[in-house]
């Protein structure tokens, strides 16, 4: 299993801290309370493996991409499918599709389509639960707009959750992007929103579990509404 580059430094730090705690526990209590030492070591191992699992980065290649496809940018559960007004950049009505990631999901994010990054911004904000509707506009978030070859623009928004405290985004304005490329990484429970043109064919349902860079979310209309 591959570890995402965003987690390597954190895992080394966690390992060092846990190792010091376990060594101290062994020297302090190994004779008086060997069971306590075993419990501490076992819990330490559980904590470390939890973080290893969180920062896993599976190799996924989407095969058969066609113009107009929108592929899931993240693992998780679909929690929103509804028309909404996107007023940060697009300033028009769009179909919002939101994917909520629990701490057990892969937290790497992928670009949902081929195109060029035409807009990127990061906004500080609150850290309310990412499955709440207001989190899309009030939480810490990063917004990326991708323009496809047909000039259709798709907005992708990474949103920090109640536990998340850092959003990493690799997008830069003017850069070409493709499905299979990593968009970024959100540390701990979080969410990713897609704002698609009205008239897009939505291929997922509410509460459906999706797989990042695997599940097809939608097909864009041939001409943007």
Image (cartoon, rainbow, N blue to C red):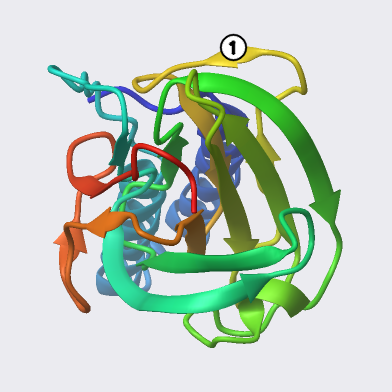
What residue is at 76 percent from the left and 78 percent from the top?
138
- The x and y percentages for residue 76 are 29, 61
What residue is at 76 percent from the left and 68 percent from the top?
87
Residue 170: image quadrant is: top right
- The x and y percentages for residue 199 are 35, 59
**Toward the viewer: 15 or 95?**
95
* Residue at the spot of label 1: 176
Which quarter shows the N terminus? Answer: top left
Is residue 182 at all visible to an observer of this figure? yes
The answer to whether 14 appears left or right of 208 in the picture is right
**Toward the viewer: 211 or 113?**
113
The correct choice, above or below, for 208 with respect to 76 in the image is below
Residue 120: image quadrant is: top right
* Label 1, residues with CA under 10 Å away: few <14, some 14-19, many ≥20: some
- The x and y percentages for residue 95 are 45, 67
- The x and y percentages for residue 24 are 55, 53
Q: Secondary structure at mark 1?
A: strand
């Amino acid at each position: 299993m591959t570890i995402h580059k965003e987690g390597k430094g954190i895992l080394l730090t966690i390992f060092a801290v846990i190792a010091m705690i376990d060594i101290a526990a062994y020297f302090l209590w190994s004779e008086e309370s060997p069971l306590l030492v075993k419990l501490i070591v076992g819990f330490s191992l559980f904590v470390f493996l939890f973080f290893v699992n969180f920062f896993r980065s599976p190799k996924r290649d989407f095969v058969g991409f066609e113009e107009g496809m929108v592929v899931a940018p993240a693992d998780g559960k679909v929690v929103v499918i509804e028309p909404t007004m996107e007023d940060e950049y697009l300033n028009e009505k769009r179909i919002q599709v939101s994917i909520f990631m629990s701490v057990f999901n892969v937290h790497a994010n992928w670009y949902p389509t081929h195109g060029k990054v035409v807009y990127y911004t990061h906004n500080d904000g609150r850290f309310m639960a990412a499955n709440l509707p207001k989190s899309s506009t009030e939480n810490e978030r990063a917004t990326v707009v991708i323009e496809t070859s047909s000039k259709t623009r798709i907005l992708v928004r990474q949103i920090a959750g109640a536990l998340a405290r850092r959003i990493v985004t690799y997008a830069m304005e003017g850069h070409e992007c493709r499905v299979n490329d990593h968009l970024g990484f959100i540390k701990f429970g979080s969410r990713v929103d897609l704002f698609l043109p009205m008239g897009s064919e939505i291929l997922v349902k509410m509460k459906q579990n999706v797989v990042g860079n695997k599940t097809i979310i939608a097909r864009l209309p041939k001409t943007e509404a």
